[in-house]
Image: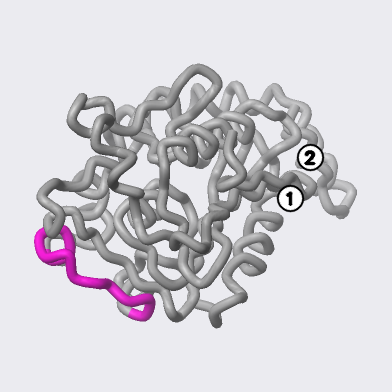
Amino acid sequence: MTEHITVEQRGHVLLMGFNRPEKYNAFTPDMYHALAAAYHRLHTDPELRVGVLWAEGKHFTGGLDLPLWGDYMSSGEGFKASDGEIDPFGLELDKRCAKPVVMAAQGICYTLGWELMLACDIRIAATDMRLAMLEVKRGFYPTGGATIRMERELGWGHAQRYLLTGDELHADEAYRLGLVQELVEPGQQLQRAIELAEKVAKGAPLGVQACLHSARLARDVGQKEAIDDLMPLMAKLSKTEDVAEGLNSFIERREAVFTGK
């Protein structure tokens, strides 16, 4: 672990923060592995239902701390989670965190910051957020998922415009294009992300995870596979305590209290 990644549990929500503001939260290999360990904790701890990814300081991240990543890139290893870790970029499709993650971004959010956003499920941005994929200006290209996911989020032309030029995409345009779901004043992004995470956490955990699984299956594998999986997955859920609680709360006209069982 590293002091540059903070991990805090608040009820059913796990806060995962970048904590290297004096270096614009430049991302090191140690930070990657600490964040990957936090994602594994979120995935495996039954008390945790939603993650929030955020950053200390005025800026989310300036990108990779490049001098520390040369050997990883030249070896072809790049971002690679170890045992007891889950890749936060979600590039190992069969080993993804099964629980949703809300991201709160502010200020400069370059390269891997944008790629982490693309891997998150709900995105909140401060109005001063600035995204950019700068790799082509440094002699290489994005390997955290941007070339795969950005077209799906923005459309081909918009994706190539930002991938191939390194231009900045500002918060208001990111909101207009649907990349982020809400804009807030700088300093309010974390609180808003926590509020949304807590709202998600009130839902039935297994139902939330099933929604996420089905949507990911349709997006990453195909609609037919997702359609074929709908009712078998529902059959499994129907045998859970949470489904019984949901039905009882409806009949009794009260708020459901879910346990994830």
Q: Quadrant of residue 44?
A: top right
3 or 248: which is nearer to us? Answer: 3
Label 2 Cα neighbours within 10 Å, binned few <14 / some 14-19 / many ≥20: some
Residue at the image position 58 percent from the left and 39 percent from the top: 2
Determine the secondary structure under disc 2: loop
Q: Amino acid at mark 1?
A: Lys
Q: Is residue 241 left or right of residue 39?
A: right
Q: Is residue 146 visible?
A: yes
Residue at the image position 30 percent from the left and 38 percent from the top: 69
Do tag 1 and tag 2 residues touch (Cβ < 8 Å)? Answer: yes
Label 1 Cα neighbours within 10 Å, binned few <14 / some 14-19 / many ≥20: some
Q: Position of residue 196 (x, y in %)?
A: 63, 61
Q: Is residue 15 left or right of residue 228?
A: right
Q: Quadrant of residue 48?
A: top right
Q: Is residue 134 above or below residue 86?
A: below
Q: Is residue 244 above or below residue 11?
A: above
Determine the secondary structure under disc 1: loop
Residue at the image position 67 percent from the left and 41 percent from the top: 49
Q: Quadrant of the C terminus?
A: top right
Q: Quadrant of the N terminus?
A: top right
69 or 182: which is nearer to us? Answer: 69
Magenta residue span: 161-172
Q: Amino acid at mark 2?
A: Phe
Look at mark 1 in the image and give the residue it sits on.
202
Circle number at residue 258: 2
Q: Is residue 28 above or below residue 190?
A: above
Q: Is residue 169 magenta?
A: yes
Q: Is residue 254 left or right of residue 87?
A: right
Question: What's the coloring here?
Answer: one colour
